[in-house]
Amino acid sequence: MLQLNVLRELRRPIGSTSEYEIDEASLLVDGHRIDGIKGAVHLLRTDRGLIASVRATGGIDAPCARCLADAHAEFAIEFQEEYVPVIDADTGSPVRLAGDEEETFRIDKRFDLDLREALRQYILISEPPNPLCREDCAGLCPGCGADLNAGPHQCAEAADDRWSALAGLKNELQEGN
């Protein structure tokens, strides 16, 4: 559950706590599928809203950085974020934030605390920058683009015309020696 109705928590006294389990089968984040998100959310009532302490694990599917095949990486994240309601739970009046607090996570007018955006941000920070399909991935041939994991192949490495002047100089020097 990544969306929690927290009206009851917002009406409790400051310092009150609540625990929720996270068990989400999958979630799409920036084009990557995240599977098996499991963890816990600890909510602490503050004078402004709630502090959510989150621990979660799961797996993310992304293309391999070397061969572009499907790769799977596990992640474990832990974070704390403050969530402030848009509407005061007791009075129904709007809760305004100072200009420098624009990035604060908000609890919507139905008193739903949505963890998806915070999870997305922390998962993207914690995912490996270059996921691999396997540790010994050979990647793609720079000449023809063939998958080198499939085995050896024969391709003529294309010469880069920008180096032809230096190649000619190299040949002249070798012939001169």
Image (cartoon, rainbow, N blue to C red):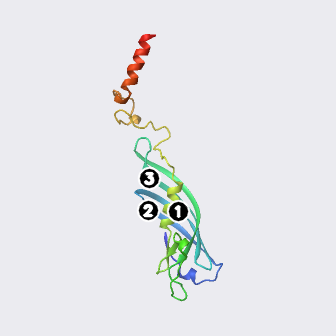
In the rendered structure, which amino acid carries the disc numbered 1? Lys
Q: Residue at x 64, y 78 (%)?
A: 16
Density class for disc 2 (Cα within 10 Å; few <14, some 14-19, many ≥20) is some
Using residue 157 as the reference point, say whether residue 8 is left or right of it: right
Q: Earlier in the sequence, mark 2 or mark 3?
A: 2
Q: CA distance from mark 2 to mark 3?
A: 11 Å
Residue with the mark numbered 1:
38
23 in relation to 97, above or below = above
Q: CA distance from mark 2 to mark 1?
A: 12 Å
Callout 3: SS: strand
Density class for disc 3 (Cα within 10 Å; few <14, some 14-19, many ≥20) is some
Any part of residue 160 in sight: no
176 in relation to 165, above or below = above
As drawn, the label of residue 27 is: 2
Q: Nearer the viewer, residue 71 or 36?
A: 71
As drawn, the label of residue 61 is: 3
